[in-house]
Image (tube, rainbow, N blue to C red):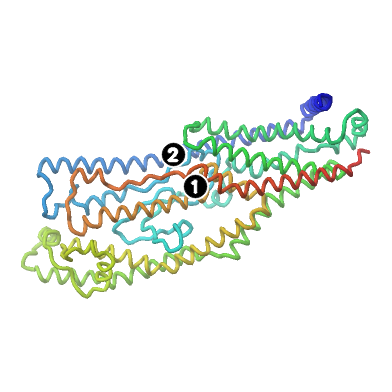
Amino acid sequence: MSERSGTLGTVLRHEWRLLRADRAVVTVLVLFVALAAYALGTGERRASAHRSALERVAEAGRRTVAELRQQAMDAERRLGAPSDRPPEYGPRDPEFVLAATRQRNVVLPPSPHEALAVGRTDLYPDVYSVMTLEIGINPYPQALPSKGAGPIFGRAIENVTSPRRLLVGHFDLLFVMVYGYPLIIALTCNLLATEREEGTLALVLAQPIRLRTLVAAKIALRGVLIVGLALLCPVIGIAASTGFAAPGDGTRLLLWAATVVLYGAFWLALAAWINASGRGSAHNVMVLAVLWIVLVVVLPSALTLAATELHPVPPRIELVEAARRARNEARVTANEEALRRQFLERHRDRIHDQASMHAAMTTIVEPAPVGNPLLDGFFARHPKLAGDRRFTQMSLFYVLLAAQEEAVARRTAAVRDRIADSLVSRRAFLDRWAWLAPASLVQRVLSDAAGTGEARYRRFFELAAVYQAEQRAFFWPRVFHAAALSPADYDRLPTFEYVEEPAGSIVRRSLAALAALAAFAAFGTSGAVVAFRRFCAV
């Protein structure tokens, strides 16, 4: 055993001297380090700017609520505690507060490891203005929570990104790992061809050393160098950006490391298999380059194209048009103008100008009209909100808005369900056939490990839908019945807090992909072992 270890150590030291003397290998490794460093630098700059922008948005929302709360406290000191009368338009009026806090956007906090992978951050919005009493609809059908779920009424604050940049993508560490990492392995793993061409391989094997020991030493040394550098990159990136302070950092880093090791093992085994053919250096490099193009570029693109063609998603404009038609139909059914004219006609003796009209609309409480299908249906679904069905004209206007929101949700349900079905089918297709493309598996796992994958955005929109329901539960009763807000009510305002998915869940979701990568590596290793049994050194 000690003799074998000594032989292996001797071969490793000899191979290390050869690698250091090989300018091509040194150049390729330096290029790999430079690319990784540049990717980390650009990723950190983008992530830092992204974090600053999102923090400004979140701080603006917090500042708005704090200012309103202070104004409500000043009003209470000046006017006393809120009474049963409808409040004047200001910080104690729920309608005023609702309008002011629309700027309190729902924000998806940036991932602590965004510097490693841009992922979906340039495709999906991470700032969303949720509406509680306004007719709008989520324009991002790809982010619908799930089939049968109501739409998120609101507007996405879109990233203004160049279409060319979206098409090309960002140069980040994920890009280097998926595309550059296997290419570096292919370019540096000319294991035996040069020695065989120069006639020195037979002399080496004439020494007391086995072929498998020589090949194992060559692969092990290259694996330690290249895979080691690839593993060092995320550690440096995390340490330079946010540090290892976030929960689950260790688990995410281990997931990243396991993926990189298995991906590297697959390409090392593939390179060894090609070298076992006994052909020349140029042939080996050409075959590995073709395999790189097929496995890294062609197959992932073909899978995406097949998923798009086999499971087409209805275009975004179809959802927008359906929502527009539903909104117009709901407005016609609501018949707001007729209700307002009837109110003004009933109280024309009290209305002389804009001020008196506003006073009448916010203070006169009347029974809600009967026979309006929109109102009757809304009150049937929400009997607690109906109360005694007596409202001010302004409150009735907001009841009609809420009823129209629900009508739009019902009338767009078919389109949304078709979109959800198509997306589920597309994701299932990609999950089913992703094992054909190792690069797709790696990209998906590394994006999830960095916290910029599609799953995180789906979770964000699901939590945003929950937050909107909480907003409605808080504001609807107060707005509909003109209940004044006290400073204590501001402490009970619904708040949005994104809860990160546990790192263990991400690992469990990635196990199938890791198993597929391990199977690829095992297959390549088996092929190389069998091929080297027939290898001729001369």
Q: Quadrant of residue 518?
A: top right
Q: Most extreme residue toward the bottom, as rendered?
A: 371
Q: Amino acid at mark 2?
A: Arg
Under circle 1, the secondary element is loop
Under circle 2, the secondary element is helix
Comparing 388 with 276, the one in front is: 388
Residue 280: x percent and y percent? 86, 42
Residue 369: x percent and y percent? 18, 71
Q: Residues within 10 Å of mark 2 (few under 14, many from 20)?
A: some
Comparing 524 with 200, the one in front is: 524
Identify the residue at image location x=20%, y=72%: 338
**Looking at the figure, which quarter contains the N terminus?**
top right
Comparing 510 with 24, the one in front is: 510
Q: Amino acid at mark 1?
A: Thr
In the rendered image, the vertical position of residue 191 relative to residue 432, given as above or below: above
* Residue 180 left/right relative to 501: right
- Mark 2 vs 1, N-terminal side: 2
Q: In this view of the protein, can residue 17 be seen by the observer?
A: no
Residue 468: x percent and y percent? 34, 54
Comparing 135 with 506, the one in front is: 506
* Residue 521 left/right relative to 404: right
* Residue 78 left/right relative to 248: left
Q: In this view of the protein, can residue 132 be seen by the observer?
A: yes
For label 2, the residue is 51
**Looking at the figure, which quarter contains the C terminus?**
top right
Residue 42: x percent and y percent? 54, 37
Gap in Å between the C-alphas at discs 2 and 1?
12 Å
Q: Residues within 10 Å of mark 1 (few under 14, many from 20)?
A: many
For label 1, the residue is 121
Q: Quadrant of residue 488?
A: top left
